[in-house]
Amino acid sequence: MLEIEVQALYAIEEHVLSLREVNGIFFALSEVGRLYAFDENNLRVAADPGLPAPVAMYHWCPLGRVALSTPSGQGMLLCLLDVEQGVVHYRELSERVAGIACTGDGILYWRIPKESLLRGILGFTSQMLRWEIETPLFQAVAFSEGTIYASAFDGSIYKASLSERASQLYKVAKIRGRVRKLVPVRGSLFVVTPQAIKAINAEGNEVFQADITTQMVECTGKRLAAAGEEHVLLVNAENWTTEQVKTGKIYDIAALGDKIVVLTKDKVIIIGEESLEEYLLGGLPAARIAVAQRLSRAFFAISFLQSVAYCRLALPTPEVSIKLAHDEPAYEVRVLLRAPSSLNPMPHEKVLLEIGGERREITLDEEGRATLRVPVSRATTLRIESTVQGAQPVELALTPPPARATRVELTRGDRLQREGVEWFVQEVLGSGGLGTVYRVLDPLHERSIAFKVPHGDPVKIQENLGKLLDEAWFMSQASRKLNTDKKRVVDIYGFEKLTAVSITGKEKGTVYGLAMEYVEGGSLENLINAGTAPIQLRLKIAVEAAEALAKLHEANIVHGDIKPQNILLRQNHPILSDFGAARLFKAIGEALVVTQYTPAYSAPETLQGVASDKSDVYSFGTVLIELLAEVLPVQYSSNLPSTAIDKIKSLKSGVQLLELLSRTRRTKPEERPSSRELYESLARMYGPA
């Protein structure tokens, strides 16, 4: 069963009363009467009536308008909002009202006047018209296609014409018991009571009754849907046939064309006349739902706490990582398929691999994984996709791997020499897509150095050595400036051309590498893996690292490989390391192919060898999710896993932080915040660095 994933999350800092879809745009009505419009790209205020108190009652009409009421002194303020025009109409009443109904161009209301407890008042207000008439005491009122329907406390059902100002109330039927709601459908009238749903036809005859206790009803086409505690009752208003669908505990229902959408604790169920679709929430804590449909694809809006989320059906996209094979000029490709919200593996699914015009079908194992080798003799594109219909493929630009014979492998005890320099290889600190980092001892200066040997072709490095030296000098100067007032990045010493000599004295060949400051104290990866750091320390590290990244970008340097291993810690203060490798590869003249990034943290555009400061922001946002929630999202996606939402929302300013992290992981780089905006937002929440 497919899952729903969060594509964009927005904090509105107000509780959401209702969600609606109008012309493909979602709208959220908040407790203070603000109407927010949102989609996958942004959120905006569509209307703000500036109510003096929280919303007491609201009612939507199909035309994209909503009527509100709120206490105002001893009376009531009525307000009509339009999703496009904003605030359309205000009306101040001197007395409280019992209920309201939106007619489209105005608001119906009914109340009990102070001077009489035996008679009621039915009123209407709009920009062009106002009237009130004396009526029986009404307990429910509805409006449809110019006709007013009303239920009196004695059980009488009335009809009247809005155009005639309800001057003639016609008694059409009588229902025993209390009435909660009236729902007109196709000329008939459904009457919702505490224990049952009844229907009255145009002639006033009771033609249907079903016993059900319901708080939620929705009309779609010719059907009425009534939500019980763990099932939905569907009633056809043409032939009075019924259908009961078991759902589990129901949180909300909504209409989607002629379908009914049901939100439960675990899933979303879409009920058509001859179809039933179920999609897992994957742990997303949804309380309200609305659904839109574009080109046969469903998009969802959900709300929880003080936030709304734009969601979509997550068609499985393979997570792909690539590294060079050890024993042949080929790539080792690893594929993983996970559900985007729950992060559960998808075992035994099939994926298609296409390269050079050849296609292969691969079956994943119990953990949703597969590993294969792909020889590449010329520049090409590797395409991997799920066999689920409509799933998007992952395309990776590959170039022939450098010949192994041209690369020198360093081991402990090797010496690195040039005139006036002799360093000793101590250990491998780590290896990533851009190169391998060694700790080497510099006896002359009595210090350890981090020495990064790029994976690039040594011939190309030699051909572009002048450019590399210039870039290294630039980064050296930049690191000094970045560290003027506080330590933010490792110091860059320079780019070196050295001769490697084994412990036995045998010359191994020429080695090129970037010499950097070695920082003791471990990395952010160590802190995350230990799992013991308090949340306040994690937030402090997040703010300081964000400030360092902003400063790096302001120095016109793209890091290119933001990940926990490259954020070092000295006395719990973060220091960015391994920055500027992207500039070096450009100086070498090599494309930044997919093996030169860490897939779990990389932005989608890096699949095509494109990196920018916004790519760093995507990677940094992913690092923050792992730091604060100890979970990694599905790679190259915009999704926030349900586990991350659950953990982060409980933090101070958690909803605002979730929105910020959601923006960092947008698919389009231009929709992500800048690193400066990211830092300033974190600083407002948790204090400056």
Image (spheres, rainbow, N blue to C red):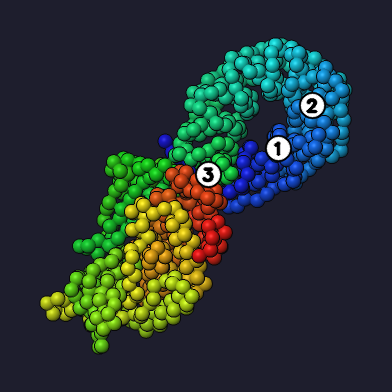
Circles 1 and 2, Cβ within 8 Å, touching? The answer is: no
Q: Residue at x 54, y 65 (%)?
A: 676
Instruction: Specify the quadrant of the image occupied by residue 108.
Output: top right
The foreground one among 151 and 477 is 477
Residue at the spot of label 2? 110
Q: Residue at x 80, y 37 (%)?
A: 73
Q: Residues within 10 Å of mark 1 (few under 14, many from 20)?
A: many
**The one of 380 and 615 positioned closer to us in this rendering:** 615
Mark 1 highlights which residue? 55
Residue 228: percent from left, percent from top = 56, 22
Quadrant for the N terminus, please. top left
**Amino acid type at image mark 1:** Val
Crowd around label 2: few <14 · some 14–19 · many ≥20 (10 Å): many
Q: CA distance from mark 1 to mark 2?
A: 17 Å
Mark 2 lies on a secondary structure that is strand
Q: Amino acid at mark 2?
A: Trp
- Label 3, residues with CA under 10 Å away: few <14, some 14-19, many ≥20: many
Between discs 3 and 1, the one toward the N terminus: 1
Q: Is residue 204 visible?
A: no
Measured as percent of width and height from the top left, residue 259 is found at 57, 30
Residue that label 3 marks:
311
Left or right: residue 651 compared with residue 503 = right
Going from the N terminus, do you reach mark 1 or mark 2 first?
1
Q: Secondary structure at mark 1?
A: loop
Residue type for callout 3: Cys
